[in-house]
Image (tube, rainbow, N blue to C red):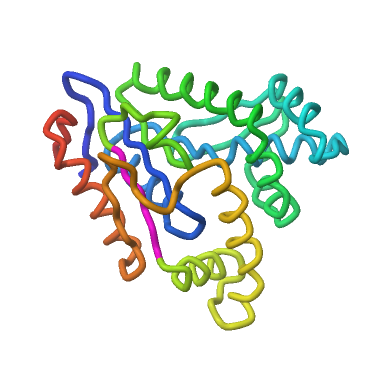
């Protein structure tokens, strides 16, 4: 039976973590179990990167990329069963996950003006979702910058080996030496680049740290649900 987070006050569950820590898949599952909305903030940066690439914008032109961010016609579905991303009339949910976008998204995500714009968009989406009961929102700086007042704040982590293997399975359906090597640059370089503007390897004060290295998917989901249930104000019931 699905849990419900509806109670005397809304619930925001903020989840951060590096690539391959499981934050996206775990966050979606937690949102489903709790009957909450779901927001993948990384998809917002990917959507902007896709839009800029289509328009042949030089991503090194920080002012033009920031201008594009301000006028980006972005629509995010916060349904955890159908987390679609639209730019204008285009459904870019699948296209923003391509290697071409993955290899350049950090150039967009480390643009400080872009981050300021996206953070405000994220706060607006969180506020709207809280009117309906709450949201699970995941990214790089949600627990510390976007939603530092969230009722539950969690940082998921995992060893480099575990993170690379997971991303290799996701992209290539294998975690052998060749598949892991193919994902190494994409995962580690992006984390290194994004770490220049966000802190997502160690939990800040008041943030629950969960190491998923040796956990199965279901165990990771259970660990997050247990952390949510530790907060008596969240009023989570089964």
In-image side of 24 versus 217 (left or right): right
In-image side of 51 versus 41 (left or right): right
Query: Residue 154 colored magenta?
Result: yes
Q: Nearer the viewer, residue 92 or 17?
A: 17
35, above or below 174, in the image: above
Query: Residue 151 colored magenta?
Result: no
In this picture, which residue range is highlighted in magenta? 153-158
Q: Main secondary structure of the magenta part?
A: strand
Looking at this rendering, what residue extends furthest in the bottom direction? 177
> Which quadrant: the C terminus?
top left
Task: Identify which residue is drawn at 68% across, 46% down.
Answer: 105
- Residue 69 position within the rendered picture, expressed as x and y whole percent measured from the top left: 70, 26
Q: Nearer the viewer, residue 157 or 82?
A: 157
- Residue 169 position within the rendered picture, expressed as x and y whole percent measured from the top left: 53, 70
- Residue 236 position within the rendered picture, expressed as x and y whole percent measured from the top left: 17, 35
Task: Identify which residue is drawn at 82% across, 34% down.
Answer: 61
Task: Identify which residue is drawn at 51% across, 42% down.
Answer: 198
Question: How many numbered marks, from 0 up?
Answer: 0
């Amino acid at each position: 039976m699905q849990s419900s987070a509806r109670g005397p006050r809304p619930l925001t569950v903020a989840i951060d973590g590096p690539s391959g820590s499981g934050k996206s898949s775990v966050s979606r599952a937690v949102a489903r179990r709790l009957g909450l909305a779901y927001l993948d903030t990384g998809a917002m940066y990917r959507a902007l990167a896709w839009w800029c690439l289509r328009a042949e914008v030089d991503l090194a032109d920080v002012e033009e990329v920031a201008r594009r961010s301000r006028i980006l016609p972005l629509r995010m579905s916060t349904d955890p069963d159908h987390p679609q991303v639209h730019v204008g009339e285009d459904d870019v949910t699948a296209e923003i996950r391509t290697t071409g976008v993955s290899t350049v998204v950090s150039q967009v995500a480390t643009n400080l003006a872009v981050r300021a714009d996206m953070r405000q968009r994220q706060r607006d989406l969180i506020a709207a979702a809280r009117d309906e009961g709450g949201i699970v929102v995941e990214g790089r700086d949600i627990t510390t910058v976007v939603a530092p007042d969230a009722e539950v704040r969690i940082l998921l982590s995992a060893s480099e080996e575990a993170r690379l293997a997971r991303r290799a399975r996701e992209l290539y359906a294998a975690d052998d030496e060749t598949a892991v090597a193919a994902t190494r640059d994409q995962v580690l370089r992006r984390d290194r680049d994004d770490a220049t503007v966000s802190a997502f390897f160690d939990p800040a004060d008041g943030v629950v740290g969960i190491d998923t290295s040796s956990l199965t998917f279901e165990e990771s989901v259970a660990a997050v649900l247990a952390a949510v249930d530790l907060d008596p104000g969240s009023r989570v019931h089964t």
